[in-house]
Amino acid sequence: MTIWICKTCGAQHAPSANSPDHCAICEDERQYVGAAGQEWIDRDTINATHANDWREIEPGLSGIGLTPTIGIGQRALLVQTPDGNVLWDCVPMVDGKTVDKIRALGGLSAITFSHPHFYTGMVEWSEALGGVPIKLPEADLDNVMRPSSLIEPWSGDVLEVLPGVTVHRLGGHFTGSSVLEWAAGAGGKGAILVGDTIQVAPDPNWVSFMRSYPNMIPLPAREVRRIADRAAALRFDRIYGGWWDRVVQANGQDVVARSAARYVRALD
């Protein structure tokens, strides 16, 4: 039995003798199947041809990205605290060097996510690090392509993972789309890790909100206002998006508020 990985979105699927006929993540309107059709790569191949790029971003925060990239090309973020470590979002592969590095930093207390496009190799990561709890919002469980008893669903809008590390379900992109509020981030001013629940634009003075980014499907104004209002109640100065270069370094609350207002004006 082989673990197959979708080359378009990076999702690992349940083990099977042959590659799946389709990827439900990519067939959803928020993602896509490319012009060449559905393509797959097996786990053994990716382990032989790829590696994880580890970067220290700020004290207490490291990034882990697959190179060369597969799928969307995001990177995961490791939040380190005195009470334990949390992995935010995921990449399709975990290798021995990455496991050793995380264990040297104290291991993992939980794996949490912004949205299903970044679930990717979550089960393999959890197993490799000793059965780490995978915290997923109940609203998005239908998007799990590789089921596991390690998945722990959570309900409601707020999940305190560790002291100073809190996940907030904002919705929008997916029903369960979330951000992580990290109290110690940005030198104690606070940071939020957003994936693309709130997407940092190429110009980091702006962010955006979409149902589908690749298919350019907007959210309605009421949803954008609601997300912005929820974000305004959080404490943060910095915003870490889902990719290495998508970071709002300062004044993040103002950036979200201005961006939401611009978005709503454009819709009106």
Image (cartoon, helix red, strand yellow):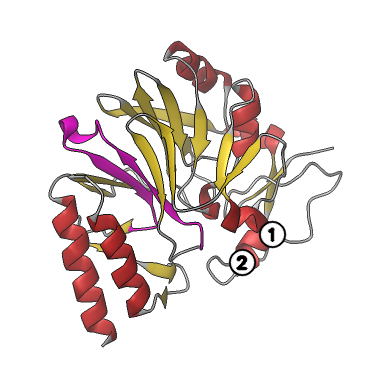
- Quadrant location of the N terminus in the rendered image: top right
Magenta stretch contains residue 46: no
| Front-lying residue, 212 or 144 | 144
Q: Can residue 179 be seen in this view?
A: yes
Q: Give the range drawn in magenta.
A: 175-198
Left-right relation of 93 to 158: right
Q: Are marks 2 and 1 in contact (CB under 8 Å)?
A: yes
Classify residue 172 by image quadrant: bottom left
**Residue 242 image position (x, y, % from top left):** 38, 48
The residue most toward the bottom is 268
Classify residue 253 by image quadrant: bottom left
Helix or strand or loop: what does disc 2 sit on? Answer: loop
Query: Compared with residue 100, is residue 267 higher up or lower down, i.e. above or below?
Result: below
Badge 1 local density, few (<14 within 10 Å), some, or many (20+)?
A: many
Mark 2 or 1: the one toward you:
1
Helix or strand or loop: what does disc 1 sit on? Answer: loop
Q: Residue 51 carries which label?
A: none
**Residue 225 image position (x, y, % from top left):** 29, 71
On the image, numbered disc 2 is attached to which residue?
A: 33
